[in-house]
Image (cartoon, grey):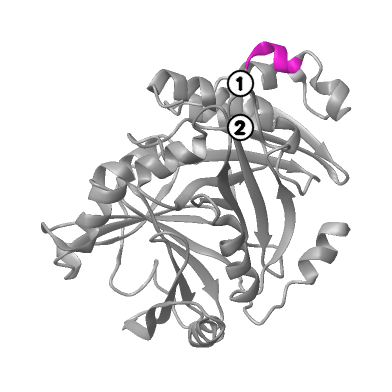
Amino acid sequence: MELEKIISEAEDFLPLLGTDHVEIIVGNAKQAAYYYMSAWGFQPLAYKGLETGSKDSVSYAIRQDKITLVLTSPLEPGGDLNRHLNDHGDGVKNVALWVNDATMSWKETTKRGAKSAFEPYTIEDDNGKVVLSGIHTYGETIHIFVERKDYNGAFMPGYTAWTPDYKPDPVGLKYIDHMVGNVDWGEMNTWCKFYAEVMGFAQIISFDDKDISTEYTALMSKVMSNGNGRIKFPINEPAEGRKKSQIEEYIDYYKGAGVQHIAVATDNIIETVTQLKARGVDFLYVPDNYYDDVLDRVGEIDEDLEPLKKLGILIDRDDEGYLLQLFTKPVLDRPTMFFEIIQRKGAQSFGKGNFKALFEAIEREQENRGTL
């Protein structure tokens, strides 16, 4: 497979086992946890707060299959968490990567030019120990290296197991397929170079403004992958268009570069999206005429077209197979972070054939917000 060949070219001096967790700084962690449990089917996992000795912040860790989110809020005025909220609104702060050796990971990346966020240190409790280290990436986003091979607790030291009675059913989400970063004008190649040289990633796909454009807006994107393909980070930057692109809108409201969306995988997108819609998750609207010729473009698929059309699910095909995908509206008050639901039926690509329909749908939302 061509994609496997490209990924194998990534230098694996930084072996990554997967995404450990994603930490989102929010204004009210208790209510955010309730939202992600009720609407998205995440399960309660662990808690850190005043009761566990954390005096300045509170965190709720929630999990669905291999996806772990940590929702963190400040408990006191001032400090970095409040500044982060004031500048960015709710948003991803830490993209934590699961590694066998957090110390080695920090040494290998910092010697290649990464700016250290914090040096390796160990936290311990009765369930064992976890080693953490961190480096800066685009905007104020940090990659934390998490070494947990000697730990058997619910999440990590400092947290207690969280076992409330309220546990809504999961909706079939499996793992994080990819996470997209939005960066400012002219910064895409800088950060792609960072992932290549500092973290040993390979570029697997590139899109320019001819691939990703509509009548009004355009953007450019490159997809970076680590050696085993478990971590994929598309990097977007704006491109010149007649009106303000979604990337510019994000940068304006987030006040800089940051994580634009988290793509979560499912084995049954019809079932997952049906449940999410029933629980109040809002998705982008796709016009019915998208489906008039979609099968002419993508060929035969296993699913009936009618339920896909009813839910607004997009379809695309590459040399390896096809994929089904759908994007939420922003899940925050600022038009910044959103989620993608994706089901891969062999395809390893990112829905290039859907870009025009997707971005026109986003532009309709921008027009409603008065930001196009």
Residue 251: image location, x then y, percent: 42, 44
Kindly state the secondary structure of the residue where label 2 is placed. Answer: strand
The disc, 2 or 1, on the residue closer to the chain's N-terminal end is: 1
Q: Amino acid at mark 1?
A: Leu
- Please state which of residues 52 and 342 is positioned toward the viewer in this rendering: 342
The three-letter code of the residue at mark 2 reads Leu
Q: Is residue 190 left or right of residue 293?
A: left
| Residue drawn at x 16%, y 65% as measured from the top left | 56
Residue 140, horizontal then vertical, whole percent: 38, 61
Q: What residue is shown at x 31% (from left), y 43% (from top)?
A: 32
Q: Is residue 23 left or right of residue 242?
A: left
Q: Are the residues at dot 2 and dot 1 in contact (C-beta closer than 8 Å)?
A: yes
> Secondary structure beneath disc 1?
helix
Q: Is residue 288 magenta?
A: yes
What residue is disc 2 on? 326
Report the number of discs. 2
Give percent across and percent down for residue 349.
75, 46
Q: Quadrant of the N terminus?
A: bottom right
Out of 63 and 106, give the one closest to the viewer. Answer: 106
Q: Is residue 289 left or right of residue 81?
A: right
The magenta stretch spans residue 234: no
Q: Residues within 10 Å of mark 1 (few under 14, many from 20)?
A: some
Residue 120 placement: quadrant: bottom left
Residue 50 makes an appearance in the image = yes
Tag shown at residue 77: none
Pick out the residue farthest to the left: 77
Q: Which residue is mark 1?
A: 311
The nearer-to-camera label among 2 and 1 is: 2
**What is the magenta range?**
287-291
Distance in Å between CA atoms under marks 2 and 1: 9 Å
